[in-house]
Amino acid sequence: GDTGVAASVAINDFDIDTKATISRGISVNQASDITDLATQTVTVRADDTLSLTSLAGALGIAAEGTGVGAGLELGILHRDSLAKIESGVTIGARSGVIVDAGAVDDLISVSANAGIGDSTGIAGSISFYVVNTSSTSAIDSTVATPTRLQSQGDITIDNNSTFQLTSVAGAVGAASDTAAGIGNVTLVHNDVVESYLGRGAIVNGGSALPENAPKSLTVKAFSSEEIVGVS
């Protein structure tokens, strides 16, 4: 025919919350009849993994006139990961206390389109991603309601967030007279990764807790991004 038009749209919208908490005022291993085991560990962990491969492709062909191919690959991601011991908690764990939040986002976006016509061939491809990610690992505490931790092992507050995106927007226009191919890759990424030990927290201190120093107290936050865009 005179005109061949093809269009494709792929839309991915994710709103993800992953939470693990010990609530305010909780006491762990504080009863007098609890056996003090050497392997006793308290762990609060929130891990989230998202793996996505998304493709938008279109082919417009016109034997005698104009061929048009257009595609949009759109991604919207809101992700929150939280591992937290709230204020006023009392914990005894001989082997260690671990608060660990982590997230892995592995995204592949492909928008590939072609417009082929005898006189005119036009193609356009867009890959557009908006990503808001937050990861928090915390032992909360206040001066008025302190959190108390006692352990002969390690006390660790750890947070690891990894973001990987491979985005391809390819467009091919083919014709004997006029041909055009336009591609665009856009990423908007806001990322917050934090770990903290709250104000007033008591680690192996206070009259109610034995004075046994832990092997180590570690507070760590790590974020990495690996982005490949091809247009």
Image: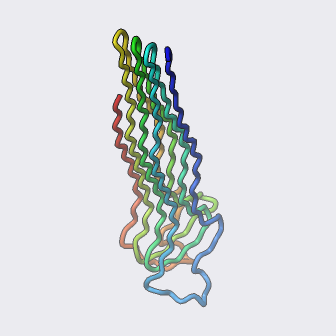
Q: At 37% across and 10% down in the image, what residue appears?
A: 178
Q: At 60% across and 90% down in the image, what residue appears?
A: 33
Q: Nearer the viewer, residue 101 or 229?
A: 229
Q: How many circles with numbers are drawn on the protein?
A: 0
Residue 201 x %, y %: 53, 62
Residue projecting furthest to the top:
177
Q: Nearer the viewer, residue 85 or 3?
A: 3
Q: At 55% across and 37% down in the image, what residue appears?
A: 11
Q: Is residue 216 left or right of residue 188?
A: left
Residue 212 x %, y %: 43, 78
Q: Is residue 95 above or below residue 198?
A: below
Give the quadrant of the C terminus.
Answer: top left
Residue 159 x %, y %: 44, 56
Q: At 35% across and 19% down in the image, what residue appears?
A: 174
Q: Is residue 68 above or below residue 158?
A: above
Q: Is residue 184 above or below residue 199?
A: above
Q: Nearer the viewer, residue 83 or 1?
A: 1
Residue 133 x %, y %: 50, 44
The colour scheme applied to this rendered structure is rainbow
Q: Nearer the viewer, residue 152 or 118?
A: 118
